[in-house]
Amino acid sequence: MARHATKIVATLGPASSDPALLEAMIRAGVDVVRLNFSHGKAQDHIDRAHLVREAAARAGREVAIMADLQGPKIRVGKFVDGKVMLENGAKFVLDASRTEPGDLQGVGLDYKELPRDVKPGDLLLLNDGLIVLTVEAVRGEQVHTTVKIGGELSNNKGINKQGGGLTAPALTAKDMEDIKTAMSFQADYLAVSFPKNATDMEMARQLANVAGAEYKHKPGLIAKIERAEAIPLLDEILRASDGIMVARGDLAVEVGNAAVPALQKRMIKLARQHDKVVITATQMMESMITNPVPTRAEVSDVANAVIDGTDAVMLSAETAAGKYPLETVQEMSKICAAAEAAEDVELDADFKGQAFNRIDQTIAMGALFTAHHLGAKAIVALTESGSTALWMSRHRIHIPIYAVTTKVTSQRRMALFRNVRPLLMDTSADRDTALAQAEAHLKLREIVGTGDVYAITCGDPMGTPGGTNMLRICEVS
């Protein structure tokens, strides 16, 4: 397996639910397994979470589980024949009061608020923007439109409004139930679909913490940036979250395809500045759903996200329903490793003009700086919560960061941090004993050998969250 710092998120689905295949995918480089709550029942997700934990145990690696909430269903209803072919210039009615199946004249809506969210002149984009309707008039519960760009429209396809502005709440009644399900198997991350602002994320956190209380579990929260309204509020959304996902599908429909690459770069940069994680998602290896090799453009796309500094790259249908789930992970691993090898390390420039007002953060930055200039073999952080490792991972360095923790929840949470390799280890409460144990652990795993130099950080006294206050440079004897 190519060693790479960038993490791989793979979506579990029918194509990847075989235990042996899932184990092989984890061995090939999957760090986070995404459970898509848009499909399946509660018990399906509980069963799949067990499947992931068992496969990870067999592979000898801990992976994080990310529960991805469905969010509001802004969709058309069903058609008599399952689909219609809309011609350019045709009239078509989106009718919130319609209960019978749709036809060429119109269709019902899952999203009943649409007539109140649109006005004449608005553009509605259906089926990921492949079909475009112009709103001509709103009469009661009916939205009368003209087909601007036609095509095949089938059951339950999504609706977006160009420029954003649909009022659907980020958390539905289904999402609230799904949060309870996700907490019952202690999902490490919860991805919230279509948040508009920080309040949506704060509400999700409150619900998750309440649902997780009986298990003493608090998940990390990922805001999926897929609404036009979220873009001006990125700072506040980042502050209320543990990370963001650049969800390029719905976002592209709302802001236009051409705007997305620059937004992606901005979001990755902003997340790193806020000490948050960032996942780049949607169509990264799309052609591998049916082909055994990616296109050159896909290779370039993944590599560019890596070079921009994303923590993780994500696979959706490629691993959930594609023909080549394992091969896709293997290809992605190779691309990540090759892109990272070409990266420049600019630590000195990173730290210029930076002020660190916390002791633990200063120690983390000191470890990076010293290890870089000494050419150390490894950086080791003894960490309870994982925050020291997170700060270190926000800066580019070609030296692997080993985060040693006594908590399996912290180990799994850190599976998403770029360039962090989390290790679970029972350490002594005595500092010097713990440092000796950590070195023995590294030698046993052949991470360091005689003569190697490594940097290690810890807290004194040990075991206090946020208490990292010591940096030691060691040479292995």
Image: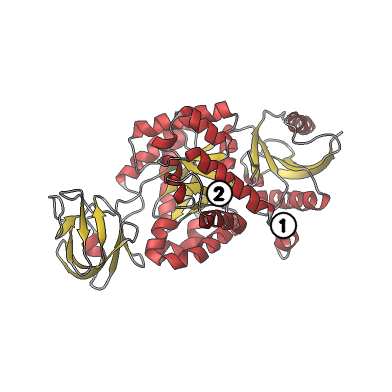
- Relative to residue 307, is residue 100 drawn left or right? left
Mark 2 or mark 1: whose residue is earlier in sequence: 2
Q: Is residue 272 above or below residue 436?
A: below
Count of labels shown? 2
Q: Quote the CA–CA distance across marks 2 and 1.
A: 19 Å
Compared across the picture, whether 318 is left or right of 161 comes to right
Q: Tell me, for residue 345, which label it has, or none.
A: 1
Pinpoint residue 427: horizontal percent, then vertical percent.
70, 29
Residue shown at the point (49%, 42%) measured from the top left: 10
**In x, y percent, where is residue 467?**
69, 43
Depth order, front residue of 174/280: 280
Percent position of residue 266, x then y = 54, 64
In front: 355, or 193? 193
Picture quadrant of residue 437: top right
Q: Which residue is mark 2?
A: 312
For the point 51% across and 54% down, the residue is 298
